[in-house]
Image (cartoon, rainbow, N blue to C red):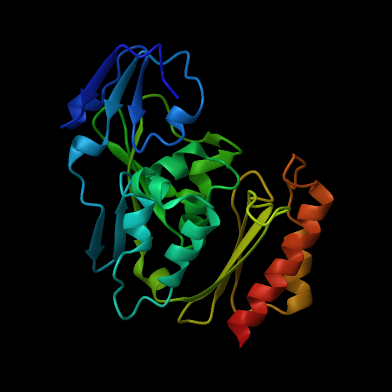
Amino acid sequence: MDLNTVASYRAARTRDDLVLAEGEVLLGGGTWLYSEPQPRARGLVDLTTMGWPATERRPEGLRIAATCTIAELARLEPDPSWRAHPLFAQCADALLASFKVWRVATVGGNVCRGFAAGAMTALCAALDASALVWTPDGGSRTLPVAELVTGNGRTALGPGEVLRALDVPAHALHARTALRRIALAERGRSGALVIGRVDDDGSAVFCVTAAVPRPAVLRYDGLPGTDALARDVRALEGFYTDPFGAADWRRHVSGVLAAQVREELAA
């Protein structure tokens, strides 16, 4: 879509370039920005010119730049110890986007949109990723991705704040994972998505997205029983109704998917 109100474009090179003038908006991949009218946008500030490495392997885990494309993440060659690596491609597939979108859409953009069905949000929340946020005063702050998204289309980002990176801890990369997703149509938007993880110490994490407006994360000292897990999932608050599913359906299928994830992890 043409953004016919936009009159300027700037390529950001330093943090100073990220100070936005009135009407300016940040541009990452642009797959959402160009998908609908943006009548308040007067200028674009390109984040992709900041030169951030798409991914950085660190002793403490993996850093994913906000400007890393979904294609780059899905095709990242794993460390042999990363048992959670298949989850990268599984979550990318859950977006149901073409390879053209994969090549330009960014991981950070998907998270910052805060949509309930954001598969990159699901990936990061399930792997205990933290968000590194640059603040307009030149400082920074970090918070869990599961807390960055506060509702469907809402985030905890303040005015002038920029998502710099997503940091996935090593213990989550080493974990065994499983994913289940359901939609009303074969190629439709996710109605519910459940990811499970079992860490080396035996603790278990289950993350529910798409069915609720923000990521819901359940933690256990060990793998819970099937009935107990399904009960805990269905007891979550926030199941909602929209054209992609009714609240009662979402609540029920989330429990079913969680039970399936649990059985795969227990196998």
- Which residue occupies 64% across, 52% down? 190
Measured from the top left, where is residue 91 in percent x and y? 50, 60
> Where residue 182 sits in the image (x, y, percent)?
68, 60
- Res. 260 image quadrant: bottom right
In front: 71, or 68? 71
Please tell me which residue lies in front, 164 or 7: 7
Q: Is residue 204 left or right of residue 57?
A: right
- On the image, which quarter does residue 49 sit in? top left
- Provide residue 52's location: percent of width, then percent of height: 21, 46
Residue 226 position by quadrant:
bottom right
Left or right position of 13 against 212: left
Quadrant of the image for the C terminus?
bottom right
**Above-or-below relation of 36 to 58:** above
Position of residue 5 in the picture relative to residue 265 (left or right): left
Q: How many marks?
A: 0
* 110 in relation to 209, above or below: above
Residue 216 placed where, x, y %? Answer: 62, 54
> From what the image shows, is residue 242 above or below residue 185?
above
Which residue reaches farthest right? 248
Q: Nearer the viewer, residue 247 or 74?
A: 74
- Residue drawn at x 33%, y 80% as measured from the top left: 81
Q: Quadrant of the N terminus?
A: top left
**At x 76% / y 54%, what residue is drawn?**
250
Q: Residue at x 36, y 31 (%)?
A: 161
